[in-house]
Amino acid sequence: METATETAAPATRGTMALLQPRGFCAGVVRAVDVVRLALEKLGKPVYVRKEIVHNGYVVDELAAMGAIFVEEVDEVPDGSVVIFSAHGVSPEVRRHARERGLRVIDATCPLVTKVHIELIRYVQQGYSVVLIGHRDHDEVIGTLGEAPDKVYLISTADEVGSLQVSHPERLAYLTQTTLSIDDTEEIVARLKERFPTVVSPPNEDICYATQNRQSAVKRAAPHIEVLLVVGARNSSNSNRLVEVGQKAGSKAYLVHDASDIQPHWLHGCQRIGITAGASTPEILVQQVLAYLRQNGYTQIDDIDVIHEDVRFALPVELRG
């Protein structure tokens, strides 16, 4: 007598809370499109300085299409096409590319470019600038390069107390675009307390996508037990989402993809939140959802905080 065997469905363990907005922001969409269109319109090879965005999956996908990623423009053959990443570059990198006769296509996020322009304007007006950001981040390195002798870089509120500036009466501040909103507010409050005349940027530098994703995490945190942030380890905004989730009371973990999830994180948890950094492709989020379904989290609740409808124009070289 034959007995039919069936794969047993996993026991229901709980619910997934899928946060929105999450994943690609307008600057990342633009940067990825720049590489794809350059390959399509200009042909191979196309070189990209640094990771176009901070996500290994995206970089590997573009490399498979024919993009060649390099650390510096020295590695690019004379006369070739080179794309600058979404994080921006210093004037020195631009100068070096010109000297090499490279054909430059700039994929810098327009919101990063805005910070560069603000810094240049302040320096031209005779100000020194306090730049709030992470020292080794590509965006900060590029921004610092605009006027390294006029910029004071700090990363924490504690650093404000030891900050020594030559002309405190002519001081302004700017920030990296992907910082924690709450941490930055604390640093700015300390700056204004110590330097009452410090000048604020005309518009907030932390980008809309960073703010929206952090707001979604804060909204969801009281209703979840664990937060999974899908993003790369070198992604500033993804790491900030983990920190925001932890401060809001959730156990929060950064995962590059589903293979990073540790089963013991989920033990006893009935409601799991899922979000993604601004450089994370949706396919990695879907892989995480599939893993959770296989482990008994069969229902999805959408937590929609705000609808994003931001688009940035392509570089002129790729339009049309």
Image: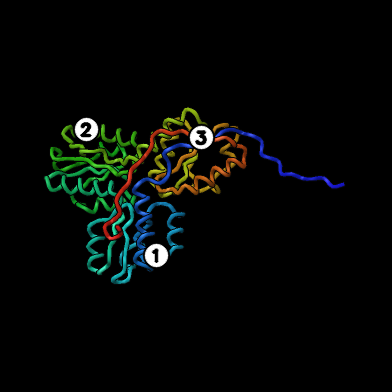
The residue at the far right in this view is 1
Q: Which residue is mark 2?
A: 192
Q: Earlier in the sequence, mark 2 or mark 3?
A: 3
Three-letter amino acid code at the position of disc 2: Lys
Q: Nearer the viewer, mark 1 or mark 2?
A: 1
Q: Residue at x 55, y 49 (%)?
A: 259
Residue 79 position by quadrant? bottom left
Q: Which residue is mark 3?
A: 17
Q: Residue at x 24, y 51 (%)?
A: 144
Q: Circle 3 sits in a helix, a strand or a loop, which is it?
A: strand
Where does the image place residue 40, in percent across and percent down from the top left?
A: 38, 63
Indicate which disc residue 316 carries: none
Where does the image place residue 111, in percent across and percent down from the top left?
A: 28, 46
Q: Are the residues flagged by discs 1 and 3 in contact, CB closer than 8 Å? A: no
Where does the image place residue 200, in percent across and percent down from the top left?
A: 20, 37
User: Horizontally, is 185 left or right of 169 in the view?
Assistant: right
Q: Earlier in the sequence, mark 1 or mark 3?
A: 3
Near-viewer residue (162 or 54): 54
Quadrant of the rendering where the C terminus is positioned: bottom left
Picture layout, residue 249 above or below residue 254: above
| C-alpha distance separating marks 2 and 3 | 39 Å
| C-alpha distance separating marks 1 and 2 | 45 Å
User: Horizontally, is 141 left or right of 3 in the view?
Assistant: left
Q: Residue at x 26, y 60 (%)?
A: 93
Q: Which residue is mark 1?
A: 68
Three-letter amino acid code at the position of disc 3: Ala
| C-alpha distance separating marks 1 and 3 | 38 Å
Where does the image place residue 55, in percent across and percent down from the top left?
A: 43, 52
Q: Residue at x 14, y 44 (%)?
A: 127
